[in-house]
Amino acid sequence: MYSVLKGVGHYVPSRALTNQQLEEMVDTNDEWIVQRTGIRERRIADEHTATSDLALAAARIALANSGVNPEDLDMIIVATVTPDHAFPSTACLLQRELEAWNAAAFDLEAACSGFLYALSVADQYIRAGTCQTVLLVAADTLSKITDYTDRNTCILFGDGAGAAVVQGGKAPGLLALEIGADGRGSQLLVQPAGGSRNPASLDTIEARQHFIQMAGREVFKFAVRKMEEASLRVLAQAGLEAGDVDLLIPHQANLRIIDSAAKRIGISPDKVYINLDRYGNMSGASIPVALSEAVSQGRIKNGDTVLLVGFGGGLTWGAAILRWDK
């Protein structure tokens, strides 16, 4: 039994936060942001919208595009670092709203690599014959944990959700996949407080420790190196070369990271899908949102070979080769 992506979907909030608006909030400017990151705007959920709301919208689109009913789902996996609650899982909230009563449901935390980690888990269950149909959703409302007084991080992050339905099939759709982690870099990208190590207190709030903190230079070097290494390994696993890739869909964190990684992998710019100028970094949602957009725009056609690659807090990374056949 092989894993096949039967349908994808995505959803982003309607409100856009532009670079010009950020100029009024923090010491920055549009030119500096674009040159540094490639980002021009990002989508922001309102105060009443939670991660599960974005996940539900994306999931419904993916189910409709795949022709799968919620009752046919065997499992729901939500990759997120901004769950609605510490417990219950956002996946259980999603199951409730979809009325997918036959599905097991759990959350997975691998930061920006979350979708690729979730895809790996789904693939194992499908190959083992335990599940036939799995719903993957990567969703985050990073605006809820972004410090809008920190010009180095507030320019980067946005909110969104991407979803995919994965089913067992006789022909391989997922040709190769790798995930990995290096916990030695765990403090390079972190939300310091809010967990059992530093529970919420007046001190943690005053120190602004409930917001994202990042050592940008170190993360940049890690990202370029791991995206290249992981991509070349999955290409080798699939018996392919960089020239066989029809479209590269990287994690949308920084245009300079994407350009550097694509060059080192050996993929030309015209084969790289970019949407971070409109959305910024949506954590684990970045890859499935870009995948869904590329499919809807006709950038991916039946028989195309697609390379997905990303990195994230942990530090984590992942890469996958897909043969698209809807």
Image (cartoon, grey):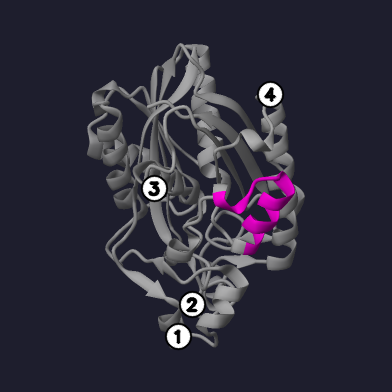
Q: Which residue is mark 4?
A: 239
In the rendered structure, which amino acid carries the disc numbered 3? Glu
Q: Which mark is residue 25?
A: 1
**Mark found first going from the N terminus, 3 or 4:** 4
Q: Which residue is mark 3?
A: 293
Q: Which mark is residue 148?
A: 2
Whole-number angstrom distance, CA of label 4 to CA of label 1: 50 Å
**Mark found first going from the N terminus, 4 or 1:** 1
Q: Nearer the viewer, residue 208 or 291?
A: 291
Residue 124, compared with residue 150, is above or below; it is above
Whole-number angstrom distance, CA of label 3 to CA of label 4: 27 Å
In the rendered structure, which amino acid carries the disc numbered 4? Gly
Of badges 4 and 2, nearer the viewer stands: 4
Say which residue appears at 42% left-offset and 45% top-offset: 294
Label 4, secondary structure: give it: loop
Residue 279, x across and y down, in percent? 43, 62
Residue 166, compared with residue 207, is above or below; it is above
Whole-number angstrom distance, CA of label 1 to CA of label 2: 7 Å
Whole-number angstrom distance, CA of label 1 to CA of label 3: 30 Å
Please provide the residue range marked out in magenta: 256-270
Residue 313 as seen in the image, left or right of residue 70: right
Residue 75, x across and y down, in percent? 39, 26
In the rendered structure, which amino acid carries the disc numbered 1? Met
Of badges 4 and 1, nearer the viewer stands: 4
